Every structure is written in structure tokens, then in C-alpha cells.
Image (cartoon, helix red, strand yellow):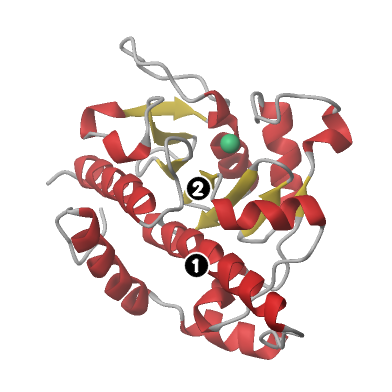
């Protein structure tokens, strides 16, 4: 299978997994940087992630311009993806979602922090991007590069950011890594709420977060990926595209 075809297949699988694991519903999206041209990325046309097929995957310039739209309508919020690829050469995949358990943290200012082993990948600090700070009253959606770049700037070198009243954005070194962090950001948010309801929480220490993160390799991520592929009804390929 050609490299590009394999990556498109992987991106479709990522969409189905994110839907199956409750990170995206009818909204939310995942992209990957183009394997042959770092100034381009791959992202589905505007469609619910669980419905996405290979032919839905479009190619975009970093500024969000479709390369060959062929009548397909893009996501309004595609600028999130281009802005992060532009700002971060290390980033190869971006997930944007409105995953339910993270929303309360974005509106209360209550910091979301790694509470368990798998949650370490969300990073030491998860900053909150508030579109109102620089853009005032908007529809809350990231609908141009200026907003996307503002979000990318707040994210800095981190892996995650919450978006006030909206959702979250996650970046990774490849598709599986970005999906892995997205799934465990949602789980961490849910468990943290349960723990806070019970009393004072002892979070992972900074040193524990670093140690777990250094051991979060493709070996462990692939184990999760195989399981998630099965749950989503997608074929598992040991190597990503
Ligand atoms: Zn959104």
C-alpha cells in the first residue's frame, strides 16, 4: 500500500476510534500532516467522524485552503490544524474535540491535572484558551487563522489545551499518539471529577508524570490501538501508515 493511502486509512480509523471511545460525537476532527509535504495536512470533509470514509479525506495548505476540494465542504474549524502544524514542526497529528467531561474544567478554571498513570500524557499543565480574551463575543468556533494562531501560541510546547465553553485540542507525534492522549484526557477529566467529589485529590507528582511520559512509547500505544480498532470495527495494522 502506498504511503499516502496507508496514512489515509489510518486517519479514517482514528476518526472511528475517537467516535467509538466517546471523544467526538457528530462534531470534532482529527488530522495528520502530509507525509510528503510538511506544508500540507490531511483532514476529512465536514462530516461526523463515525461516518468518514477514505474518499472524504481532503488535502489542505497550512492556511486552510483546500488543494483539490472536488465539491467537498471542509470543516469550518480546520484552521486549528494548520495553525498548529505551522507553529510546531514536531507535531504530526492534531485532534480537536468537544469531549464532554473536559468542558467543565474550561469554564470553572479548575485545573485538569494527571490523576492516574494513563493520564500522564496530557502533560503537567493543561492551559485554557479563552477566545473571548482577544476576539470578544464570537460563535466560539476557530474560524480563521488568526484565532488558530492565538490558540497555538497559548498551547506553546504542550500536548493539550482546553477551550473555554467549547472543547479541547490535542497534538501528537503521530496519529496514534494524538488519539491516545485525547482518549485519556477525557478519561482523566471524568476520574478527576469523581475523585474531587470524594475529597482532596493527590495528583501524580511532576516526577511521576515525566517518568510515565518517557515510557509512553509506540509499544504501549499500539496495544491500546489494537484494542480500539477491534472496538471500532476497523482492521489493525501493527505499523502506522
Ligand atoms: Zn470545535
Asked if the residue at label 1 sits under 8 Å from ligand 1, the reply is no
Picture quarter with ligand 1: top right
At which x and y percent is residue 32?
A: 41, 44
Against 217, residue 91 (above or below) is: above
Quarter of the view holding residue 127: bottom right
Which secondary structure lies at badge 1?
helix
At which x and y percent is residue 157?
A: 68, 59
Write the residue at 55% across / 64% down: 185
User: Which residue is more in the foreground, 231 or 61?
Assistant: 231
Q: What residue is disc 2 on?
A: 94
Q: Label 2: few (<14), some or many (≥20) within 10 Å?
A: many
At which x and y percent is residue 147?
A: 72, 31
Considering every residue shown, the one lying at the far front of the view is: 198
Quarter of the view holding residue 224: bottom left
Q: Which mark is residue 223?
A: none
Quarter of the view holding residue 180: bottom left
Asked if the residue at label 2 sits under 8 Å from ligand 1, the reply is no
Q: Is residue 128 among what the camera can see? A: yes
Q: Which mark is residue 184?
A: 1
Amino acid at each position: 500500500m502506498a504511503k499516502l493511502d496507508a496514512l489515509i486509512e489510518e486517519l479514517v480509523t482514528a476518526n472511528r476510534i475517537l467516535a467509538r471511545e466517546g471523544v467526538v460525537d457528530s462534531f470534532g476532527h482529527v488530522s495528520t500532516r502530509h507525509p510528503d509535504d510538511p506544508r500540507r495536512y490531511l483532514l476529512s470533509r465536514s462530516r461526523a467522524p463515525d461516518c468518514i470514509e477514505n474518499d472524504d479525506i481532503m488535502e489542505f495548505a497550512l492556511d486552510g485552503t483546500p488543494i483539490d476540494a472536488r465539491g467537498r465542504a471542509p470543516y469550518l474549524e480546520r484552521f486549528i490544524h494548520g495553525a498548529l502544524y505551522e507553529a510546531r514542526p514536531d507535531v504530526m497529528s492534531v485532534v480537536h474535540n468537544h469531549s464532554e467531561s473536559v468542558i467543565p474544567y474550561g469554564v470553572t478554571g479548575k485545573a485538569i491535572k494527571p490523576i492516574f498513570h494513563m493520564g500522564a500524557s496530557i502533560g503537567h499543565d493543561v492551559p485554557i484558551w479563552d477566545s473571548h480574551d482577544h476576539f470578544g463575543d464570537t460563535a466560539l468556533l476557530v474560524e480563521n487563522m488568526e484565532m488558530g494562531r492565538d490558540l497555538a501560541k497559548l498551547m506553546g510546547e504542550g500536548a493539550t489545551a482546553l477551550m473555554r465553553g467549547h472543547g479541547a485540542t490535542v497534538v501528537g507525534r503521530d496519529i496514534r499518539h494524538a488519539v491516545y492522549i485525547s482518549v485519556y484526557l477525557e478519561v482523566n477529566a471524568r476520574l478527576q471529577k469523581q475523585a474531587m467529589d470524594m475529597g482532596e485529590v493527590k495528583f501524580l507528582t511532576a516526577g511521576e508524570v515525566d517518568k510515565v511520559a518517557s515510557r509512553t512509547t509506540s509499544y504501549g500505544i499500539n496495544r491500546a490501538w489494537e484494542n480500539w480498532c477491534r472496538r471500532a470495527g476497523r482492521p489493525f495494522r501493527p505499523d502506522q501508515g
